[in-house]
Amino acid sequence: MTKSNETMLRGPLFGNIVMYTIPIILTSLLQLLFNAADLVVVGRFCGSISVAAVGATGSLTNLMVNFFIGLSVGAGVSVAHGLGGHEDDVVHHTVHTAIPTALVSGVILTIMGISLCDTFLEMMGTPENVLPLSAVYMKIYFAGITFTMVYNFSAAILRAAGDTKSPLVFLSLAGIVNVVLNVVFVRFFQMNVAGVALATTISQGISAVLVVRALMKRTDACKLILSQIRFYKPQLVKILRIGLPAGVQSSLFSISNVLIQSSVNSFGDVFMSGNAAASNLEGFVYVSLNAFHQTAVNFIGQNAGARQYNRVYKILWVCLGCVTVVGLVFGGLVWTFGRPLLSIYITDSAQAIEYGAIRLTYICLPYFLCGLMDVTTGALRGLGESFAPMVISVLGICGLRIVWIYTIFQVPQFHTPDCLYLSYLVSWIVTFAIQMAVFIRAYRKLLRDA
């Protein structure tokens, strides 16, 4: 058993969870900096229309990418269960099944993204002065999406094995390259959004190569041997059983966000610019919260595999407490300094900054509720339950927001940004309450069957 595995299965939970989660938070923040650097550079050198163009692609790219990212969750949970149960053959086969799954996912996404982006952008009501730039950004981004898939699957394996520091180091190096290339391509080669998309693709390629190399250098069951890469049926089935519902859930989340983006588009390009900048700022809070989701998945996954059910319940409550504190602190800070932060992205429209401030008020301040919801989802996935959280989230997040948009939001006096953003808060509360009840029921069933 490696030292990282011991910290997940033995010892004090609070300290181990915090030390495990901090590198995930930092890694996720660096990933977000890819897109933040895109927005800042185009905002500084190209104007708010280019900011709107990049921002308009976010919900649409997530719609297509998140389904396949969900499969990486299945790979991570499968590895965690195998490590917890000391099943080295299962872990070995899972690792060597995950990599070709990532490659196939990347090829499918490249074909879909390049061929369908124009159609989807038009369906979302993207303004004519924004659409061409958005399409260019998306096509270049999806041309290199395989790198993103390989990185996410490989990083999920490392985290399931207790290694959260290596992905941080790799993304730090790639992030530096991304920022430098952003400036070079946009400032000196006048490539506009095409330049930032190309910079992101190159940097993601670097991070993918580094994380695969790390798997190849391991000495435990997670070691990657290129000649043994193939689809092992039992492991592929488990990855799909856990990962497909997670992917469907993420994609359906994105559908609701696409509808919200379409509603945002109805307020015009200035509002779109403010919304895009605010959304990017919120992302820094969200990934800090979502890190505890990943922690819950892997800590509970290993302890469930080892049948240490008494630690499972404690892990959930430690993660819930941590995510509440982090959400209140980080969300409050971003809201407090919202306007100065928004001015980093937007330099040519005071009105766009004000629009962005409205979004921060409704999303950032209560963001810890989203964190609570994500942690309970992660806890259920760690137990191997993936279908139940999918159904709950689809109904509680997607269903509620869609109903909100097509009913309350359509009433003239409620067709406002405030009413639109309020749908987030309501959906978080409802979904968290149901997820928590389902976890308690699933946990009690595990105790009865043990």
Image: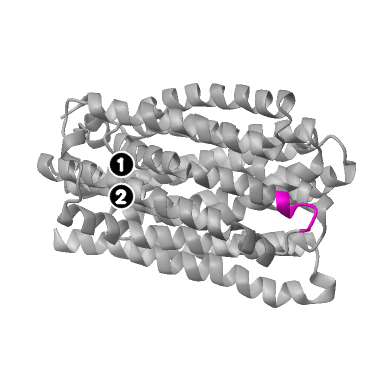
Q: Is residue 333 left or right of residue 433?
A: right
In what quadrant of the picture does the C terminus appear? bottom left
Q: Magenta span has 42?
A: no
Q: Which residue is mark 2?
A: 101
Spatial CA distance of label 2 from label 1 is 24 Å
Residue 240 image position (x, y, % from top left): 29, 58
Q: Residue at x 60, y 55 (%)?
A: 59
- Of residue 15 and residue 216, the one placed in the foreground of this image is 216
Quarter containing the N terminus:
top left
Residue displayed at 62% across by 64% down: 119
**Is residue 81 found left or right of 421 in the rendered image?**
left
The residue under label 2 is which amino acid type? Thr
Q: Amino acid at mark 1?
A: Phe
- Measured as percent of width and height from the top left, residue 34 is found at 58, 34
Residue 244 lies left or right of residue 141; in this view the side is: left
Is residue 144 depicted above or below 183 in this figure?
Answer: below
Judge whether 12 appears above or below 328 on screen: above
What residue is disc 1 on?
Answer: 299
* Range of magenta residues: 127-132
Q: Report if residue 128 lies within the magenta region.
A: yes
Q: Main SS type for the magenta part?
A: loop
Q: Position of residue 229 (x, y in %)?
A: 20, 41
